[in-house]
Amino acid sequence: MVAQMDSHFKALPIHRRVRRLMSYLLFEGRPLTTKGQFINPILKVFYSTCSAFSKSKLKRDPAFILGTGRSGTTILGVSLAAHESVGFLNEPKLPWYCSNSLDDVIGSYSDSDALYSMSESDFNQDSAQKITAIYKAYERISNCGLILDKYPEMIFRLAYVQQIFADGKFIFLFRNGKDIVSSISHWSERKGEKKAGETHDWWGRDDRKWTLLCNHVVAYDDDLKASIQNIKAYTDHKHRAAVEWIVTMKKGLQLKQQELSNFYPLRYEEYVTDEQVRSNLLDFLNLPTSDTYNDYCQKALREPVSHGEFFLPSEILDTFNRVQKELGYKDFANHEK
């Protein structure tokens, strides 16, 4: 689907559709595993012209969707884009890379150094001015009241982002880990490709994302660091996906425990089935009730179908199952035979 617009979204008022299409074409960039990457150099020039907006302030700081990819982050963003006030950016990694060259963990736009995690110490005023200027241009062109940025990996950069957008809001979306692991594995097998002697898949250009995840996150995880050499050697997509899910969910749970007023844990299974949960999310985002949003959600959202059993290596099995339990799920992985 172009710009993630399904048949229900295409039935929305025209300015919603135009806003979503403009977001997709001008402010998201085309990553490694997609077509149309020829537009990226053009967009880089366009973003550099956005410096004219560098002295203008946003109406309000953006909201961010955090978590693990394939957990429903896209449908959450698309559904909120049905709201008249929301401009949704689906993984706008090119603007973030153009603002900070250390951002690109996939290798879509560069093969230079990158950071999976960022903290306050990685903040610099120049990067902040660049991303703010790009977002100000987007805000004006889209005429939106709230920019919604879906960038799951930002959960490891929350402190860095807060240095730029002090009043930003963060939605931590979580979902049954068994479903996520199966979905990531299927995605990588379906979308992965060999190109110019390189492997391009979920794990980046020739495993760039996987290497950075292991070196910058897994190697410091209290439960997994003792097995880091075994984990680094994983080639099975499900095993890798389980590791990514574990460390991401642990980070989300850690942030949840801090009871931050701008951090909102959201269970995917409840969002797609419970209108009151969706109403509570609008309240958190300081958005009014929207008939088009409610109507789209009722038509487009479906209760997920759970995947069957699967198996994990011993060094990650207990941690995976413990995190599942902490999140309130009762489906557990089994020991790999």
Image (cartoon, rainbow, N blue to C red):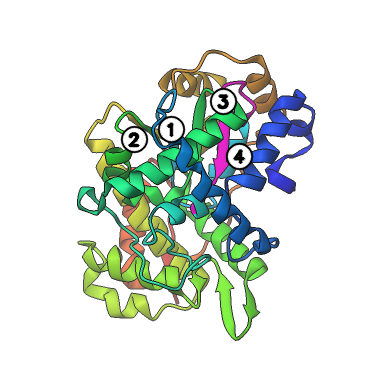
Of badges 1 and 4, nearer the viewer stands: 1
Contact, mark 1 vs mark 2 (Cβ under 8 Å):
yes
Q: Is residue 176 visible?
A: yes
- C-alpha gap between disc 1 and disc 4: 18 Å
Give the CA separation, mark 3 to mark 2: 17 Å
Nearest the viewer among 112 and 190 is: 112
| Kind of residue at disc 4 | Ile
Seen from the viewer's position, the closer of residues 236 and 188 is 188
Q: Position of residue 113 (x, y in %)?
A: 36, 70
- As measured in the structure, the alpha-carbon distance from the residue carrying label 1 to the one carrying label 2 is 7 Å
Question: Along the horizontal axis of the image, is 301 left or right of 166?
Answer: right
Comes first in the chain, label 3 or label 1: 1
Nearer the observer, 221 or 17: 17
Amino acid at circle 3:
Cys
Rendering quarter of residue 289: top right
Q: Are marks 3 and 4 in contact (CB under 8 Å)?
A: no
> Which amino acid, mark 1?
Pro
Label 3 crowd (10 A; few <14 / some 14-19 / many >=20):
many
Q: Earlier in the sequence, mark 4 or mark 2?
A: 4
Q: Which residues are magenta?
A: 80-93
Per the image, label 1 sits on a secondary structure element best described as: loop
Crowding near pointer 1: few (<14 within 10 Å), some, many (20+)? Answer: many
Secondary structure state at the residue bearing disc 4: helix
Amino acid type indicated by mark 2:
Phe
Q: Is residue 331 visible?
A: no
* The label number, if any, that marks residue 144 in the structure image: 3
Q: Which residue is mark 4?
A: 75
The label number, if any, that marks residue 62 in the structure image: 1
Nearer the camera: disc 3 or disc 4: 3
Looking at marks 1 and 2 on the same chain, the residue that comes earlier in the sequence is marked by 1
